[in-house]
Image (cartoon, grey):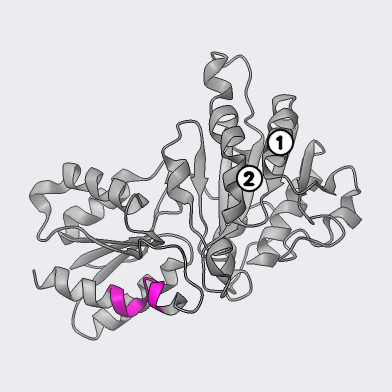
Amino acid sequence: MLQAINEALSSEMEADKKMMVFGEDVGHFGGVFRATSGLQEKFGRDRCFNTPLTEQGIAGFANGLASNGMTAVAEIQFADYIFPAIDQIVNESAKFRYRSGNEFDVGGLTFRTPYGGGIAGGHYHSQSPEAYFTQTPGLKVVIPRNPEQAKGLLIASIRDKNPVIFFEPKRLYRASVGEVPDGDFEIELGKAEVVRQGTDITLLGWGAQMEILENAADMAAKKGISCEVIDLRTLSPWDVDTVAASVKKTGRLLINHEAPLTGGFAGEIAATIQEECFLYLESPIARVCGLDTPYPLIHEKEYMPDALKTFEAIKASVKF
């Protein structure tokens, strides 16, 4: 996945001379995970460079660049660090177009940031804050599950005429391996993907949790339960039609995400789907999520909404 992200950034910098990549340690060092490795050497210090250690400053600088017609791709080193930048992102990036009556915008702006646990990072390097931004009109929120999706969705995010927050599942950076198309390759934002057809229950997730869902679906299949598996990919705007069509077919829905249960994006999905599919539901919509605690270090395994927890929830839903 790291190679796919790096390739997406490199190909877009070649195609768009106005594109700049910046953040903490993204220059010669290549970023803490090496996602920007080689970009400064290839495109020079004027187009790929380090910033001071100030997330609010990174976001404010990105807003300024994008408002002047540049393509700004800013890296927030960990998603946990994005909170000091919330004022700039929520009050400036998201509202730039609206407040001017579409006279000016920051449409060339993308924030990249690694999110989630699974690397023993503790409570300051493992959070999944995607839901905070889905409530902000004017932002798009995108999360890939594998290298192919990472490249296609990142290129689409950079080209999109709206500010995008691109969350990268860090535990998959080197763990997720797959074929990726060469050259120009774009995946439409706002469209979910049905990655496995099924008839008994719909499993919905995004990012690193998709592997968890597929493992749980394999476990369920051994018990004669047919799971339809959907990758949401874009959380804002999210693809209600694809999810609703699946739930009308299966009659059941389970949503899995790594963020805490309370206030997580699963609650928004559940509320919408019960409005769309109430008469089709055979059981209550299930949520398998992280715990309502700070992200733990030594109890990371217990915190994670893993395949076994998901499998148990699948059985409970089908037997309801």
| Magenta-colored stretch includes residue 164 | no
In which quadrant is the C terminus drawn? bottom left
Query: For mark 1, what is the residue?
Result: 62
Q: Position of residue 217 (x, y in %)?
A: 30, 75
Q: In screen coordinates, is 258 left or right of 173?
A: left
Q: Position of residue 259 (x, y in %)?
A: 41, 59
Q: Residue at x 34, y 49 (%)?
A: 263
Secondary structure at numbered mark 2? strand
1 or 2: tag closer to the N-terminus: 1
Q: Residue at x 11, y 52 (%)?
A: 280
Q: In screen coordinates, is 48 left or right of 124?
A: right
In the displayed structure, would residue 193 be above or below residue 46? Answer: below
Q: Count every numbered label the image shows and give the total.
A: 2
Q: Could one spot residue 271 in this view of the protein?
A: yes
What is the span of residues highlighted in magenta in the rendered image?
302-310
Which is nearer the eye, 198 or 54?
54
From this viewpoint, which residue is outermost toward the bottom? 222
Q: Could one spot residue 161 in this view of the protein?
A: no
Secondary structure at numbered mark 1? helix
In the displayed structure, would residue 25 be above or below residue 295? Answer: above
Q: Residue at x 32, y 58 (%)?
A: 261
Which is nearer the eye, 63 or 84?
84
Amino acid marked by disc 1: Ala
Which is nearer the eye, 195 or 33?
33
Q: Residue at x 38, y 77 (%)?
A: 302
Query: For mark 2, what is the residue?
Result: 111
Q: Quadrant of residue 213?
A: bottom left
Proximity of marks 1 and 2: CB atoms separated by less than 8 Å:
yes
